[in-house]
Amino acid sequence: MAKKEEKTNVMRALDKAHIPYRHYAYPVEDGHIDGAAVAAKLGQNPEQVFKTLVTKGAGGGYFVFVIPVAKELDLKAAARAVGEKSVSMIPVAEINRVTGYIRGGCSPIGMKKRYPTVVDESSLEFDTIIFSAGRIGAQVEVAPKDLLGLIGGKTAPITAHTA
């Protein structure tokens, strides 16, 4: 008998909120778990696959930013979006303590605490976006407005413009 895929806390939260989603699984044995590799493994547009980044503001608070996997976070724009003087990425060693997730499996849904969250405004160009389901090897596809409603998030232009 085939083992049934175990639901993640992210999927359970989406189920509880009656938010429709699509689940994706991808192989992790090759060690390639960065966002661009995940988008390629899923055969998805990297502009539609998002990563979750956690920062700490100058005032000591934590902030979450969700951006396309092929883009970089504009730290100045991110700070403006949350009303901080500045924000900086937290060290990888702190991710689990702050969020309850590990690097590569961090999702904007289901963190230990609800932190102010900003999703890049480019998400609104798509009917759905894909992001971590809270475990390496698992992704979910959700309408951006449903995600924003569930996490109490907002959108803003927070990615760096590349030449």
Image: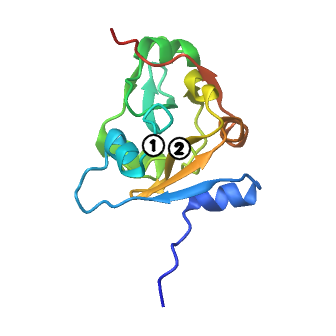
Q: Would you identify the image quadrant in which residue 153 lies?
A: top right
Query: What's the residue at 54%, 48% (across, down)?
Result: 111
Return the mark for residue 99.
none
- Per the image, label 1 sits on a secondary structure element best described as loop
- Tag 2 and tag 1, C-beta contact below 8 Å: yes
Residue type highlighted by circle 1: Gln
Q: In the displayed image of the protein, which residue is found farthest to the top?
A: 163
Judged from this view, the residue extending furthest toward the front is 43
**Residue to which mark 1 is pinned:** 44
Which secondary structure lies at badge 2?
A: strand
Residue for point 54% across, 63% down: 8
Residue 17 point in image, percent of width and height:
75, 54
Q: Disc 2 to disc 1, how far (Cα)?
A: 9 Å
Pick the quarter of the image with the C terminus: top left
Dot 2, crowdedness within 10 Å: few (<14), some or many (≥20)?
A: many
Q: Residue at position x 62%, y 40% from top?
A: 128
Tell me the tag on residue 130.
2
- Residue 82 sits above or below residue 129 on the image: above
